[in-house]
Amino acid sequence: MTLLELEGVTASYGPVQVLDGVSLSVPENGAFGILGANGAGKTTTLRAISGAVRTGGRIVFDGKDISGLRPDQVAALGIAHVPEGRGSFGDLTVRENLRVGAYLRKDRKGIDQDIDYCLDLFPNLQDRIRSNASALSGGEQQMLAVARAIMSKPRMLLLDEASLGLAPSTAKNVYEAIRRLRLESGIAMVVVEQNANLAFTLVDSATVLETGRNVLTGTSAELRGMDEIRRAYLGG
Amino acid sequence: MGTFVQLVVDGLSTGSVYAAIALAIVLVNQATGLINFAQGGMAVLAAYVAWALTNRGVPLVLAILLSIVFSFVLGAVVERYLMRRFERGDPDTAVVVTIGLLTLITGVAGWLWTYNNQSFPSLFPLDTVSFLGVSVSIRSIGTTLVIVVVMALLQALFVGTKLGLALRAVAINPQSASYSGLPVGRLLMVGWGLAAALGAVAGALVAPQLTLTPGMLDNALVYALAAVILGGLTSPVGVVVAAWIIGVLENLAAVYVPFIGYDLKVAVPFILIFVVLIVRPQGLFGRKTVVRV
Amino acid sequence: MASASAVQATPSPSAASPAPSFTERPWVRRAGALLLLVVLVVAPLVLPQFANETLARVGVFAVAVLGLNVVMGYTGQVSLGQIFFLGLGAYVTAYGVQHDWNVVVVFLLACVVPAVAGLVVALAAARLGGLAIAMVTIALPIVGVPLAKRLGDVTGGSQGISARMGGAPEGSGLYNDQWTLYVVLVIGGIVFLLTRSLVRGKFGRAFAIVKGNEHVASSMGISPYRYKVLAFTIASLIGGVSGFLYMYVIQYTSPETMSFGHSIQLLAAMVIGGAGSIVGSILGGAYYVLVPQLTNEIDASLTALLQGAILLAVLFVLPGGLASLLRAVTRGRRRSGAGNGAAAPSTTPPSTAGSAPAAGEPETERHGHA
């Protein structure tokens, strides 16, 4: 059954139209990729879902139209956004960052358990639990950003360019952890990724955006097989 | 020797008042990147509210507590309905808005309660206590203690509570905070409210000494801003220490430097700033330039 | 508005449509400037004494606001100390006049002393960057007032100091108020023309870049520090000129002249007139002089309240100040195709006071050599 559905979503920054009718559909427990060149509108699509930009069209989450809600209201419905650039709270410690992620929850015990789960998922964070987030490496900050999202016990994760600026091996580690998270928790995901190869290790299906419009949508297997996709996004 | 100790203790007391206003300014700046020039004016308004309440027979302590609550609400309302649309814009415009607010608040106080000096009852007895052969005024000790306690409470709020954590998170990265479900707008209102409440404490403590007028804290605002420059916007501890240094130094200068005297002691922090600027442009404790460019 | 009606009277070639718009044609501009000059020359002769005196005061504060505009409107550095330089210029002038110095020397000192003071302040304050200039300059009036009181031997202390510079010269056939207004118009006019070419020239472009983005400025080889200091120094110098004019017109100054309240009022006048606008400076000067008079009429105890409310209202609904309203009006007319020189009034001094008859004013004796 469908968890998230976008229908003809539009958005603009000032006079510049960035989304020109984006549609997509993510089933419960599904993972959906958004591919495309720089400026195609991938990040804006995630921001549209989160309510960080004003949009036209319909955005339905769990049967409820969420367009027009504020980001914190969207978060309260169970959508956790891992923003581009990680969005760490630099002057807070790693543990405090995780507690901010759990802001909407009241179950103390559950929060402590989930912190332990995050540290198990990202063992690198274990040693840095008392450090300020600003002292972390890029990879560790990315792990922290995902962990912070997990702490809100979301039903859906919006993942924006998790590999950006990371060494290939680090990016692979991050994606492996996310894959494990998906297997163990069944959280649905919308994944924006420049590196399509990496994305296809995680998502079941995907869409390709060009200038704010869907140009191709299909399952990972279908898309992987297409020549133009391979040429444009898979480096071969 | 006796005079010297008394001067130092008095200086710490006035320094604490500057420190409270300076901290309020830092609090607002951390949350919204603005400098609120109306911080002192809002505190004066709170003092007037307390004064008006005591005139109606409300006990002083209760009146002050009520004025603190009033200030909290005032700060929140000002953030929501006045400052919010200027927060993400040009900081210079926002500064002018706070100056407009200062003018408006001064005008409201002057209109409601005239520009004449009103005497404000003191929380503490005006006696002195002897301590190691030196007499020290109880009011100075009491003022300092109350403000130190209030600061400790604030520190505990910021470090030890979920609300404090949320306030810090919003100050650092509002966008990311909203993705974690933090109601950014409401938290900014709380931040402004807390700053205004802190100012109200300072106003109530210093009003008996200065006597209540709409412009009562204009000078204190200048001292507080000097403390903020010297301490560095990023360092609350630095700001408090700088405020104490200013309070003590100006008191000593007033007595021991004949040219300065009581009327010109307001120049002391700025002489200090000139010296510090030449030696340490980042402020005494700050990490980088005082204000982001 | 004599000029406006006069321009409107000329046949409007609305048929010869869009380009270039009527008010942009060179001959129209030249004619407008000439007309303005004629109005400025004639007005003092025909206006009543009260109006001339008010206009002279408007001129004084228009110059002060112009100075503030150089540092704040054009360079983007909030200064809360401009009134201090007006006060300093006024005291220097008073001191010189009392000691019978040559008036030209007095004028030059009234420019140089505030400029040097401004330079020293800016050298320190501009190091901090950002809002710190506002945080430091707020101290100028707060320190300036007790300092002026303390230096009683020079400043006359709290009592203040008065000094009269000659009235209308004999044989000029002018009343004193007419002569004074001419002096303000000539000196103020020169300052405005010089400032106008400054902000439209090379320095003005540098100021604008520093205001827009200091990083960009640095990357273009424009030192934000140097240009901020320069702008602040020029603003102080212009403040000194306004101080000289203040003394010329009002003939008396006291520490109260540079009080914190006046400093804030001056800033409000600049924002309300229009930041970064020459015309806005004149409107600001008019606001500074006329509005407190008006609010005092309504209820003196409401003055500060109304001023704060007006400032906030302008910031909310008209961030460009009154000057932007004028601009919008002219543009609107231009767009509608009606080429009836609506731009002309924008360069005339606000003549609200001029049109107000002095009737009802107790007729004071008019001094001079008429």
Image (cartoon, rainbow, N blue to C red):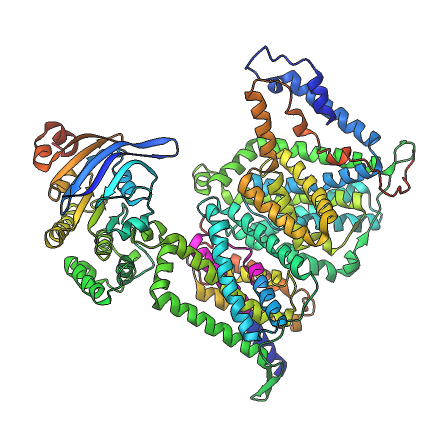
Residue B1 or residue A58, whichever sits in front: A58
Q: Quadrant of the C terminus of chain A?
A: top left
Q: Is residue C99 left or right of residue C326?
A: right
The range drawn in magenta is: B17-43
- Picture quadrant of residue B258: bottom right
* Main secondary structure type of the part rendered in magenta: helix
Position of residue A81 measured from the top left corner of the image (x, y, whole percent): 26, 48
Q: Residue furthest top?
A: C15
Image quarter hosting the N terminus of chain A: top left
Report x, y in % for residue C221. 46, 38
Is A80 rendered above or below residue C74? below
> In this rendering, is residue C42 above or below C227?
above
Residue at 73% in and 62% down: C150
Can residue B245 be seen by looking at this rendering? no
Image height of B2 relative to A207, above or below: below
Q: Is C218 contained in the magenta span?
A: no
Residue under the image location 26 percent in, 29 percent down? A211
Asked whether the viewer can see residue C71, the reply is yes
Tag count in the figure?
0
Q: Residue C105: give x, y in percent of width and height.
A: 78, 43
- Please state the horizontal and vertical placement of residue C181, each as a whole percent of the image: 79, 36
- Residue at the outermost bottom position: B133
Nearest to the observer: residue A143 or residue A131? A143
Q: Residue at x 11, y 52 (%)?
A: A180
Q: Is residue A75 above or below residue C56?
A: below
Residue ID at (31%, 50%): A73
Q: Nearer the viewer, residue B229 or B128?
A: B128
Q: Left or right of A79: which side holds B39?
A: right
